[in-house]
Amino acid sequence: MAATSKEIAHALNIQKLMLNQRCIRNIGIIAHIHHGKTCLTDNLAAEAGMMSKELVGERMLTWIDKQEHERLMTIYGATVTMGHKYEGEDYLINLLDTPGHVDFGADVTQALRAVDGAVVLACAVEGMMPQTETVLFQALAEKVKPILFINKVDRAIKELKLTPEALQKRLTDLVNEINVFIMKNVDPKFKDEWKLSVEQGTVAFGSALRKWAISVPAMKKFGITFKDIIELCSQDRDEELAQRAPAHVVILDMVAKHLPSPIEAQKYRMARLWRGDVDSEIGKSLINCDPNGDLAIGVTKVV
C-alpha cells in the first residue's frame, strides 16, 4: 500500500526532529492493569494524526497481537512516535505503551531500559494499586523520572458523586500516597527534583477516554478552573471540556517541560545501562549521545 502525502510529511518531520537531541523525549506509560495506558496512547496518537479521533478507546493502536484484543490487555510493549510543539519549539516524543498485568513485569523492565521518563497513570476511582507500586518501583530502579496522570476523573465525578471538596481531597491524598512511595524508593540524589508537585505541574488530572485533562499550568494557559471541570463533566459536556482543555496538550506539555532529554538522562543512566569503561572512547560517546560515536546496541528482548 502506497504511503499518503500526510504519512510522508509525518515521516520527514520525524527525521528532522531526530537531529535535535535536546528536544527528544523517550517516555513510557506505566500503570496497574486497566488504568488507561493504551487508551491514553490512542488519544495522543490520534492528535498526532496517526489514527481517527473517533476510535480513541476502541482502536487500541499499540495492541499488535490478537491475544491483546481477545484478553483486553497490553502484553507486548509497542512504540508510537509523534511530534509536539511546546513554547515555540518542536519536540519528538517516542512513547512506549507497557503491560500492566503482573505476569508481564519483565516486559515493563525491558521498556524502561529504553526510556528516560515515565508517565505514571493512576485511576481516580481505584487509587494506587499493587501494580502501580510495582511498575513505579521498576522505573525508579532504572533511574527513569516519573510524572503523574490521574485518569478516570470523569468516573469519580459521575459515579462516586463527590463534592468538589471531596474530589479535591481524594486527588490530593492519592498524589501524597504516590509521593511517599517515590521518596521511599528513589535514589537520594533525585529526591528533591523527582518529587511530584501539583503546583509545579508534574501532576495532571483528567480522562483519557473523554480526551480532557487539567493541571495547574494548564488552568492558567486555558483559563479554566477546577470548578469548571466538575461542572462540565457532571453535565456530560465532556466534548466541550476536551475542546477547552485537550488531554494531549496538557500531557505532552508536561512531558516536554518536566521529563529529561537523552542528553540529560544518559549522564546518570549509563552506569545502569552499560557495564563498560565510562572513560573509554565509546563510553564517553554513549554518555554524551554522540551521533558520530561507534555503534552500540542494547538488546532488550530475545525470543
Image (cartoon, grey):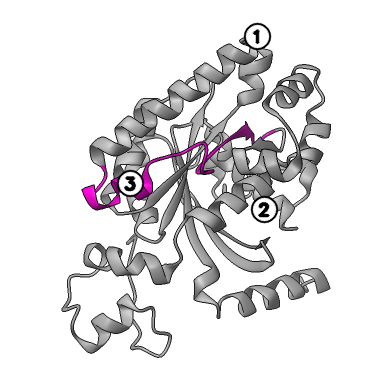
Q: Nearer the viewer, mark 3 or mark 1?
A: 3
Query: Would you call the spot at circle 1 few (<14 residues within 10 Å), some (14-19), or many (20 or more)?
Result: few
**Sequence-first disc among 1 and 2:** 2
Disc 1, SS: loop
Image mark for residue 161: 1
Picture quadrant where residue 242 is located: top right
The answer to whether 146 appears left or right of 45 in the picture is left
Which amino acid type is shown beneath numbered disc 1?
A: Lys
How many neighbours does mark 2 have within 10 angstroms: few (below 14), some (14-19), or many (20 or more)? many
In the image, residue 180 lies in the stretch drawn in magenta: no
Amino acid type at mark 2: Ala
The stretch of residues the image draws in magenta is 186-209
Question: Badges 3 and 1: C-beta atoms under 8 Å apart?
Answer: no
In the rendered image, is residue 106 in sight? no
Which residue is drawn at the image coordinates 77% and 72% (left, top)?
A: 3
Whichever of labels 3 and 1 marks the residue nearer the N terminus, that label is: 1
Q: Secondary structure at mark 3?
A: helix
Instruction: Judge whether 23 appears above or below 108 on screen.
Output: below
Checking the image for residue 192, the label placed there is: 3
Q: Which residue is mark 2?
A: 45
